[in-house]
Image (cartoon, rainbow, N blue to C red):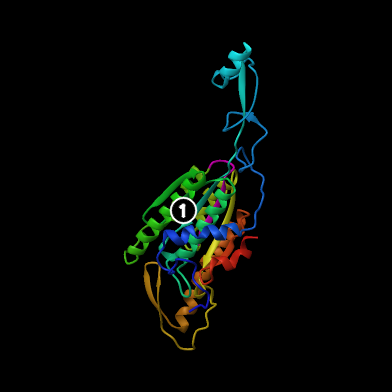
Amino acid sequence: MSAVQLPLFADGVSLTQQELLACQNIARALPEKRTKARASLAGHRASSIKGRGMEFAEVRHYQSGDDVRTIDWRVTARTGKAHTKLFVEERERPVLLLLDLSHSLYFGSSLMLQSVQAAHLSATLGWSAIGNGDRLGALIASEKQHIELKPRSRQQGILALINAMQAVHQQQLDALDEVQAEPNHIYKACLRLRRIAKPGSLVWIISDGTHFTPDCLGPLAELKRHCDIGAFLITDPLKQGKIALPKQFQLPVKDGDRELVLTPHSYQSWLKVQRQHQQQFISMMAQLNAQPRTIDAGINLQQQLGTFR
């Protein structure tokens, strides 16, 4: 068992609202990065463009072609001449999370399940997004369902994400013994993500890479044409060969919907398959110019902040 302590309120298996709310503290410690928008949405800085928006800028004389809905009737009545209001356009960048909660992530050899670490990471990125004034949305993918959360501002966005993650995570835990018959659910999620992501969005992909097949590259490449993509690979010490094992052992594991007993020989074969899945995901993201950062489920996320730099 790892000597690293679990995060606040976490037991490493289930998922609670308290531990996801506590990820706000991790988000505050993240290095801030300023990026230019690729389209009309640029984050929480106000635009110099005058137009319809939330923040009042000034009043000027009405000109032909102005929207009559912007006429300032008080100033018009006082001066006897038509005046119209101008606004500073608010620009918020949509941040979308593609969170993979497939059963392959319900694996943990040391500190917590990979699915729990993926949820912690998603909550942290979510808190960071709303802290920067961006709008937060998500697509949570499992074998049984895709939960779409449209980008929303402030607390609405992060609370919707937290509630959805907690619900899907528990449903997946309850269904671990069920046979899954949907081999293309992540490909379908990529197709859906391509449709819902607005131009200029920042998309974070969070997965263990197991179900990202070569077919996924097509829709993601189309998405890359008008969005920025970043990726995180969620791993486990046993799946990376980092745990010292005795010369002779029989290690029962649950790998997705399969129950296995690993021996020294079968472990090497199993480990080779895990590394192939990881490398395929890394190679696919590299083709999208989105070199994934690796997050270990055997280490508290707060101790991996250097990965975000």
Q: Residues within 10 Å of mark 1 (few under 14, many from 20)?
A: many
Eyeballing the image, is 289 above or below 261? Answer: above
Tag 1, which secondary structure?
A: helix
Residue 240 found in image quarter:
bottom right
Position of residue 161 measured from the top left corner of the image (x, y, whole percent): 45, 52
Say if the magenta span includes residue 37: no
- Quadrant where the C terminus is found in the figure: bottom right
> Is residue 289 visible from the viewing direction of this image?
yes
> Is residue 211 visible from the viewing direction of this image?
no
What's the residue at 45%, 67% (across, down)? 10
Please provide the residue range marked out in magenta.
198-207
Position of residue 187 measured from the top left corner of the image (x, y, whole percent): 46, 53
Position of residue 252 measured from the top left corner of the image (x, y, whole percent): 39, 78
Specify the farthest residue to the bottom. Answer: 247
- Residue type at mark 1: give it: Tyr
Position of residue 308 measured from the top left corner of the image (x, y, whole percent): 62, 60
What's the residue at 60%, 38% (across, down)? 91
What's the residue at 65%, 54% (across, down)? 32
**Would you name the residue on which mark 1 appears?**
187
Say if the magenta span includes residue 202: yes
User: Is 305 or 190 nearer to us in this picture?
Assistant: 305
177 left or right, relative to 249: left
User: Is 94 or 243 nearer to us in this picture?
Assistant: 94
What secondary structure predominates along the stretch shown in magenta?
A: strand
